[in-house]
Image (cartoon, rainbow, N blue to C red):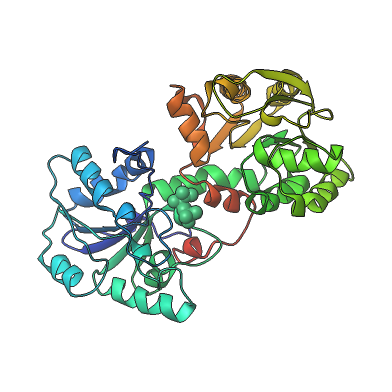
Amino acid sequence: MASYHLLSDIDFSGKRVLMRVDHNVDVDEDGKLKSDEKIRATLPTIELLLKQKAKLILMTHVGRPKGKVDPRYSTAGVAAHLRTLLPNTGVKHITSTVGPEAEKAAIELEGGHILYLENVRFSPDEEGEPEQQKVLGQKLAALAEVFVNEAFASCHEYEEASTCAVARLLPAYAGINLQKEIMMLSPVLHDPPRPLTLIISGAKMETKIPVIEHFLGKGDFILLGGAIANTFLAAKTGSIGRSKFEADRMDEAKKIMERSGKNGAAVLAIPTDCVVASQASETAQKSTVSADSVPKDMSIFDVGSATIDHYISVIEQSRMIVWNGPMGLYEMENFAEGTKRIAEAVAAATKNGAVTIVGGGDTIDFHARHNLPLSAYTFVSTGGGAMLEFISGKPMPALEVLR
Ligand code: 3PG
């Protein structure tokens, strides 16, 4: 950590501080935030800066509006929520991200107060070509004297103006939660307690393959669930009924399975039995079948009990566990059993001294829906994709610029 510029290195009093947060929080149909974990994770840094009477300017992305103004993704809702968390602090929201309105509001901002900018992804420059990002970075930098990154979940292997370009133009510091993420996730990369197990699922092979590949070389066990497990099952068994899978990724899945357990590689486990039903519904008749005989008119919605028992036996012997992604269609009680039992096993492993790291939006959402405490684990990462990229050892430019 010593090589990052830390908040303790500087006195922020009276300074205009531009802070990138990741307040990218799902909102339900009534406009209510589904979970405010990500907002709460930024409070220690916000409170520290307010205590020092910094003039705090916050910016975040919400959703993927792809460079267009879309009221559904306005930051007004998260700013309003922040007001409820900080009732004694002035939190002013504006509908610009940069430009005259933002500049005026930044100048008028008083110490100990917050200015909340509009969604950085409303600008096509945020995720644009390097030149575009540089231009937006300059406009953002014009608002402040110092930059703080408290948005670990937004630190990807690719650059964005609000995490990289602006950080190159101002003195740039790592926020408290961002420091903690780096501190807690680094041991996964360097000399982890062993056995080291990765439990991973999710919809898209593209985002999960790099971390699976990395763990084949560095870890001991990889336990697969969810839709990506379907692609592996399809590659292995040839038929998985009507279950969703990625046909164009089957060769990759085959190659990975061939490497499993060979020449010191981690052992990769895929489901041996599955919970199937003819439709995704709470009332659907479900049954457990062997993974190699999924009926043609059925889809896989959860892992089966033999698979869970095997996964739990691996979890029990592991000393470090990284878990990203529910095992099945956890939103429905009918198909949540696999994920619940994995959660219980990982929580029990934590009690028995294993280091357990949990991350990913769906995994967090699963805990909220089932009232399961996240405090049962050693560390809960605010990053989904960012956590996976970090523990795959990928260079992350948004972190590098804070050194
Ligand atoms: C997340 O939800 O993982 C972060 O907010 C990053 O969002 P992104 O994947 O759209 O960059």
Residue 36 in the image, given as x and y percentages of width and height = 34, 38
Specify whether 122 is left or right of 201.
Answer: left
Residue 200 in sight = no
* Above or below, 109 relative to 317: below
Residue 332 in sight = yes
Quick one: 118 or 186, which is closer to the camera?
A: 118
Residue 12 in the image, given as x and y percentages of width and height = 23, 59
* Above or below, 171 relative to 91: below
Residue drawn 72% across and 50% down? 214
Residue drawn 54% across and 65% down? 158
Specify whether 286 is left or right of 22.
Answer: right
Specify whether 165 is left or right of 58.
Answer: right
* Above or below, 35 relative to 65: above
How many numbered circles does the render carry? 0
Residue drawn 39% across and 68% down? 167
Residue 257 in the image, given as x and y percentages of width and height = 84, 43
Image quadrant in which you'd find residue 324: top right
Q: Residue furthest bottom?
A: 131
Residue 281 in the image, given as x and y percentages of width and height = 56, 26
Specify whether 12 is left or right of 391.
Answer: left
Quick one: 187 or 19, which is closer to the camera?
A: 19
Residue drawn 63% across and 33% down? 321
